[in-house]
Image (cartoon, rainbow, N blue to C red):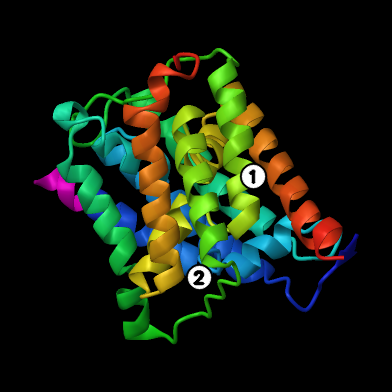
Amino acid sequence: MKTTITAFLAGLIFGLGLLLSNMANPEKVLGFLDLAGDWDPSLALVMVGAIAAALPAFQLVKSRGQSFWRMPLRLPNNIQIDRPLVIGSLLFGVGWGLAGFCPGPAIVATGAGQEKALVFTLAMLAGMGIFQFGARSVLPARD
Amino acid sequence: MTIDWAAFTPATAFAGGALIGLASALLMAFNGRIAGISGIVGGILEGPASGIGWRLAFIVGLLIAPMIWQLFSAMPSIEIESSFPTLVAAGLLVGIGTRYGSGCTSGHGVCGLSRLSPRSLIATILFMATGFITVFVVRHLFAG
């Protein structure tokens, strides 16, 4: 139960951060990705703010070795720069540049009642399903 | 490149980013989990082994954030110019790409860089690069 509550609060604060920074607005994100147009550097400062908060916290938690709820830290242990990482990230960037949505903002904008965000989110879930149940057997293995 | 100073919102960008970082820190500190949205959502499809409840709770938090926001302030504008076919194509690419590449802007961009992960640095450089290229092609090569 308590892990559910902290996960909920983390999701809520994450969503409020996306709204405050206006990153749930695809036009704002595309303003950053449009280097050749009138460039809006805001997204870079969102990253700086997020890393400034998370980096010291991660170091502290890592040195503790377990979470406050005495749960193991589930950190990725793959350190290879492999083909799935490269191909997947390249594909993700194309989709991100097409609509200006990545997963978090799309879900928040869906919560704000945006019909088009819901369409994107459903297509994204379908894409995740295709990966999970179809493409996995075709694409080179991940991990 | 010309900087659009009128659109640039450094204070709210940094403060909003700090909230995103705080949320990521909380999820790691209490649940021992990376706050990667594509991983949290996609993990549900992997079945109950890695937990479903906390994943759904995080997603519900994201979904109701706009309602909580509106208790205190007017909603910021959300402008979605893309056509429905573009949204579907983009959504499919984001869904497949983030799962195959093991992360998105949050998992690699925020959490991965905060963990000083070389894999996440490469991922972030690559998805930013194709993001820049895609917008250049759509807005400047095709739009004319």
Q: Position of residue A129 (x, y in %)?
A: 34, 37
Q: Residue placed at 21% from the left, 52% from the top? A: B57
Looking at this view, name the residue that lies furthest to the front: B85
Residue to which mark 1 is pinned: A94
Same chain letter for marks 1 and 2: yes
Under mark 2, the amino acid is Leu
Q: Position of residue B54 (x, y in %)?
A: 20, 44
Q: Residue placed at 43% from the left, 15% from the top? A: A77
Residue to which mark 2 is pinned: A20
Residue A124 belongs to the span the image colors magenta: no
Residues shaded magenta: A1-5
Q: Residues within 10 Å of mark 2 (few under 14, many from 20)?
A: many
Q: Nearer the viewer, residue B87 or A23?
A: B87
Under mark 1, the amino acid is Val
* Mark closest to the chain's N terminus, 1 or 2: 2
- Subunit ID for the residue under disc 1: A
